[in-house]
């Protein structure tokens, strides 16, 4: 395994990532009860020297549901029947999570409703009101 490249300016060294294998509840045929194919990736955010304070805070706030009280992010994969494939899948998912957490969300540009739309809405309301009034008068005339 080599270092994990999140962005060109953010590379996480392999020494900061830990892996563990356990038995998977997914497909495995005869091996399902014998071979540990589920791979779990552990990344200690609080002690990661590859992250600066801004990145650390942003990851902790955006991924707070996936991080335990010790500040460890856990990503597991049991999609495939081999450890190698699950390891690759967990790394890809980890990269995706970190990229999404560090992505800047664009600020919303406040917009105003055009005058023509306001005018059209009011005219439609008047038209509906007149239609309903005419209906009520028709009913009262028939009685």
Image (cartoon, rainbow, N blue to C red):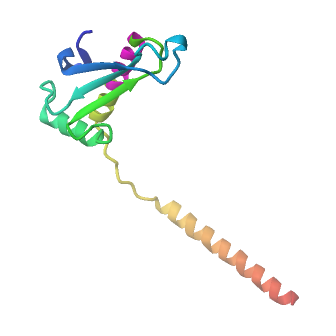
Task: Say whether residue 3 is left or right of residue 94.
Answer: left
> Residue at left 87%, top 87%?
142
Does 54 lie within the magenta span?
no
Q: Position of residue 101 (x, y in %)?
A: 29, 35
Asked if residue 92 lies in the magenta stretch, the reply is yes
| Residue 4 in which image quadrant | top left
Left of 143 or right of it: where is 63?
Answer: left
Looking at the picture, tell me which residue is in the foreground, 7 or 77: 77
Point 32% across, 25% down: residue: 94
Which quadrant would the C terminus be assigned to in this image? bottom right
Q: Nearer the viewer, residue 127 or 51?
A: 51
Q: Main secondary structure of the magenta part?
A: helix
Residue 51: image quadrant is: top left
Going 81% across and 89% down the picture, which residue do you hit?
140
Residue situated in front as seen by the camera: 88 or 99: 88
Q: Is residue 96 above or below residue 115?
A: above
Q: Quadrant of residue 95?
A: top left
Residue at the farthest front position: 34
Give the residue drawn at x 30%, y 38%. Answer: 63
Most distant residue in the right direction: 142
Does 1 sit left or right of 132 as displayed?
left
Image position, residue 70 (x, y; %) = 20, 37
Task: Tell me which segment is drawn in magenta.
Answer: 84-94
């Amino acid at each position: 395994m080599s270092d994990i490249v999140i962005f060109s300016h953010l590379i996480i060294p392999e020494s900061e990532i830990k892996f563990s294998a356990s038995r998977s509840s997914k497909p495995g045929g005869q091996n399902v009860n014998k071979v540990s194919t589920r791979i779990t990736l552990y990344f200690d955010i609080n002690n990661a020297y590859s992250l600066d304070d801004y990145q650390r805070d942003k990851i902790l706030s955006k991924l707070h549901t996936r991080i335990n009280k010790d500040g460890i992010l856990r990503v597991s994969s049991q999609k495939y029947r081999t450890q190698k494939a699950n390891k690759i899948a967990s790394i890809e998912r980890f990269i995706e999570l970190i990229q999404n957490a560090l992505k800047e969300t664009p600020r919303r540009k406040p917009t105003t409703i055009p005058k023509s739309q306001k005018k059209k809405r009011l005219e439609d309301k008047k038209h509906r009101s007149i239609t309903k009034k005419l209906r009520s008068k028709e009913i009262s005339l028939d009685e």
